Image: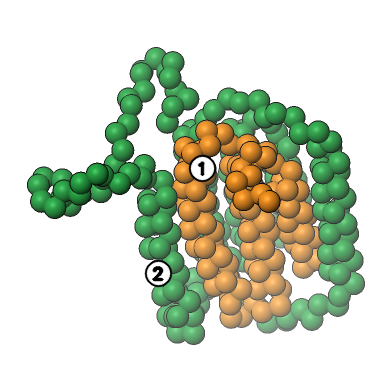
Amino acid sequence: MTLAEGVQLVAFGILTAMMLGSALGVVLLSNIVYSAFLLGGVFISISGLYVLLNAGFVAAAQVLIYVGAVNVLILFGIMLVNKKEAFPEVPRAWIGRAATAIVCIGLFALLSTMVLGTSWTLSTEPAVGDGATVLIGIHLFSDFLLPFELASVLLLMALVGAIILARREYIPDEPSVDGPDALTLPERKRELVSASGADASDL
Amino acid sequence: MIQLEYFLLLAAALFCIGIYGLVTSRNVIRVLMSIELMLNAVNINLMAFSNYLDPATATGQVFAVFVITIAAAEAAVGLAIVLSIYRNRDTVDMEQFNLLKW
């Protein structure tokens, strides 16, 4: 990174404030749609932090995959299960929330003391900078080849599994051996939702 | 100069926010979002270590790419499970998903 140190520090401060504010909004806001959009803000701030860490390729991948795919997927999920419902109150729910907050703050304190108490042996080698893209490619096809191939198999499994889980599953009474729909997956009939949205709670 | 400790503290804070959201959320989709926050905190750690402790080989960046891949697969399968549960139980309230409660 060839920016001046002051610029780096100011950018780090802005990105930190954006990230922590958006993350608190994701967790604490009551409207789930606002949470999803703030999650996109968190991802973009993290991408900026990666740029500060001399990792342009991973920053671009972060924007493409998280903002472009995961966040859009979550927004579609919210749209598909968009049911306005008031959750019934659980008695003494504040005890659980307070206990969780105490545990989280304690964990943060523990991690902070560990981070600040350790003397890290910083490397003095120059960072590869933009050459990191080439290095990542070399790693992926030499010493990380097996994890790379396993990741592709895992993505295929996730693809098939997501389709199978999200389908309307249905076992027909007599399986059609031949005929026009012999090679199609049987699917339950769906009621069409009226355009006025009166029956929008039905998926 | 930005120190390594700043990034580690930032990642720790993000991870703790993610845990708080994971435990206290009532909405299933918010739980998924909290898991994404925690995965991103881990990624910040990996990238910070890669930049400050081992800048010449970029191994930490390869790990981060793998974590991003797994997180995308996890989000897809998680949302499919949420849709399936929503069809069966007609709610997104975590407190009512108690089929396996003894």
The residue labelled by disc 1 is B85
Badge 1 density bin: few <14, some 14–19, many ≥20, Cα 10 Å: some
Output the chain of dot 1.
B
Front tag of 1 and 2: 1
Q: Position of residue A192 (x, y in %)?
A: 32, 25
Most foreground residue, A53 or A72: A72
Q: Is residue B93 left or right of residue A142?
A: right
Q: Kindly indicate the quadrant of the structure image that contains residue B30.
A: top right
- The chain letter for the residue carrying disc 2 is A
Colour applied to chain A: green
User: A149 left or right of B36?
Assistant: left
Quarter location, residue A199: top left
**Mark 2 — residue?**
A153
> Residue A18's quadrant in the figure?
top right
**Residue located 57% across and 71% down the image:** B63
Q: Is residue A195 above or below residue A36?
A: above
In the picture, which chain is orange?
A: B
